[in-house]
Image (spheres, rainbow, N blue to C red):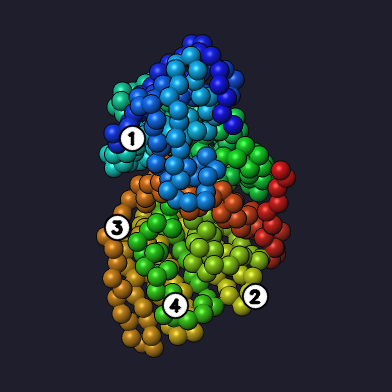
Amino acid sequence: MLIRVPDPPRACRVSLRRGSEFLYFFACSCHKIDLVVPTLLRSRTTLKHKDLASFLGHRAKADTRFAFDSVTESQCWIVSDHLCKYCERVAGKFRLGLIGTGRHGGRYANHIIRDLPEVELAAIARRNPAEAERQAQEYNCRAYTDFRELVAARDVDAVVAVVPPTVHKAIVEAAAAERKPLLLEKPAAPNVAEGMEILTTARRAGITVMVAQTLRYNGVVRCILEHLPEIGPVHSMRLGQRFEPSRPGWIDDPAVAGGGMLLHTGVHCFDLVRYLLKQEVARVACEWSRVNVRRTEDNFAAVLRLQDDRTLATIAGSRATGSRSGGIELAGEHGQLIGDHVLHSAVLVRGTETRNLELPPPVPTVREVLRDFVRAVRSGALVPIPLEEGLRAVAIVEACYRSAAEQCTVPVPALSYKI
């Protein structure tokens, strides 16, 4: 609803340009009122942007147009906070705030700066003041030691969090309070119970939350997905991830990390089972062990039975070898697909004959996740990996921990939340 009001106090003018048209916006300090559209340059100005039309609720035709009569600066149109942020997003660079700039968070920062010309890194948040200041100078942005200040910053359009999952709940609560879209590094949550609290908070606030399940963007994974119809109905799947030991630190502290390799690496495989087979996991049996770590786990094996009650998947992970591999095998009625997402290979097997599949050049999966997140938020589209998707992988992890503890096969917990 549009309301006429007198001049807003403490107004700050921002100029936005779309093509040959200029609109002048005033940021008003009134509660929940953040945008005022004062005098338009012509006596009659038409906004033709179809996304803006859709945003305002006029969905009958894609070419819906809006005409505004000329108004004086003392008779302004007040527009909601959502429209203010939307107009700013479509008019200029999309401004991201990054929480967590350690080893992996640095990858996000570099991709934002180097590979996404339509995006600006507005601010970073890191607990270490000296490191935060040093990196802010390197990235040419502001630094915060309290992530809540970053989330609340007026020039941050959306937030990216690359931190341990035990911090996600507090970040989602801050983003919900500010109505800011959020990209969470996997795993989405340390456990299902906390994940449901996060989901409830996000749903109540109506904010977009995407989970960075980056393995979905791998070229080998996408090639295998494309060729799945050639092997017929799949009844067997095998996935493996084996890497070098992680550096000592929070990753082996369950109070911070929330879990070990099952949660932080296995979650990739569990998500991939759902992504490739297009069905849910019904129950699991799992064992894990410690090779180099003391308080979590760095070696596991799990058997998953899917909801069709005929498809089985075996998942194995090791973070205790001086090598790297990421095997993917699927067996169907007419053949097999065998690949490795680390070694960048994929073949189709029929009988005893193999055919090498044409693979796209390797791409930085973090960059692709960021592009999809920004594209979805700017256009108002659904994100490709919503929070619920990330939480379903966490539910499989939780079932694996329970199975190993109880030494039996257990069902995967269902997701349920309250609004």
Q: Which amino acid does label 1 sit on?
A: Arg
- Marks 1/2 in contact by CB < 8 Å: the verdict is no
- Give the CA distance from mark 1 to mark 2: 55 Å
Which residue is at the front of the view, 102 or 26?
26
The reply to whether discs 1 and 4 touch (Cβ–Cβ < 8 Å) is no
| Disc nearer the start of the sequence (4/3) | 4
For residue 179, what is the image quadrant?
top right
Q: Which amino acid does label 4 sit on?
A: Pro
Task: Answer left or right for 414 relative to 232.
Answer: right
Label 3 amino acid?
A: Pro
Q: Name the residue under label 3.
A: 362
**Residue to which mark 1 is pinned:** 18
Q: Nearer the viewer, residue 167 or 18?
A: 18
Q: Earlier in the sequence, mark 2 or mark 3?
A: 2
CA gap between label 4 and label 3 equals: 23 Å
Report the mark closest to the observer, 1 or 2: 1
Say whether disc 1 or disc 2 marks the residue closer to the N-terminus.
1
Which residue has dot 4 on it?
229
Q: Are marks 4 and 3 in contact (CB under 8 Å)?
A: no
